[in-house]
Image (spheres, rainbow, N blue to C red):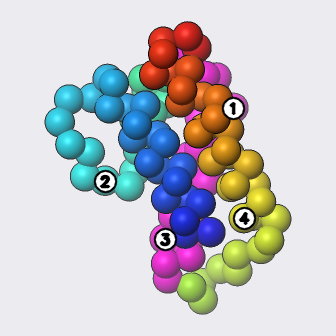
């Protein structure tokens, strides 16, 4: 789960690198992504990103909440969508 969530974060940062000047030194990038891309990708995807990244520390600090296989599959599906469709389209300016 940690690797999947990190993949989501890096995909988001790749898209943000086209509109944000300077280095992003935070894991809290969902709001910034929504601010810049909500009208292009839709509020549902922005919501899914925010919900996934809210769990960023969960696999790093286990014991507080259980990570279920379904949670990992959902996050992986989102990571693949970002990697294969959303971010490439944003980088090309098509979406």
Tell me how far mark 2 sits from mark 4, CA to CA. Answer: 22 Å
Query: What is the number of the mark on residue 72?
Result: 4
Mark sitting earlier along the chain (4/3): 3
The extreme left residue here reads 22
Q: Would residue 2 be visible to someone looking at this image?
A: yes
Residue 8 image point, x, y percent: 54, 49
Magenta-span inclusion, residue 58: yes
Which label lies toward us, 1 or 4?
4
Query: Upstream in the sequence, badge 2 or badge 4?
Result: 2
Task: Tally the marks.
Answer: 4
Provide the residue span drawn in magenta: 40-61
Q: Which mark is residue 26?
A: 2
Contact? badges 2 and 3 (CB < 8 Å):
no
The percent coordinates of residue 57 (x first, y second) are 49, 71
Name the residue beneath numbered marker 3. Answer: 57
Question: What secondary structure is marked by label 2?
Answer: loop
Tell me the CA gap for discs 1 and 4: 19 Å
């Amino acid at each position: 789960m940690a690797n999947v969530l990190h993949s989501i974060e890096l995909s988001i940062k790749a898209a943000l690198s086209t509109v944000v000047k300077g280095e992003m030194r935070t894991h809290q990038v969902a709001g910034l992504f929504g601010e810049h891309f909500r009208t292009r990708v839709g509020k549902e995807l922005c919501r899914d990103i925010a919900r996934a990244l809210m769990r960023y520390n969960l696999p790093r600090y286990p014991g507080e909440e259980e990570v279920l296989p379904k949670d990992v599959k959902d996050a992986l599906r989102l990571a693949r969508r970002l990697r294969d469709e959303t971010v490439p389209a944003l980088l090309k300016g098509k979406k």
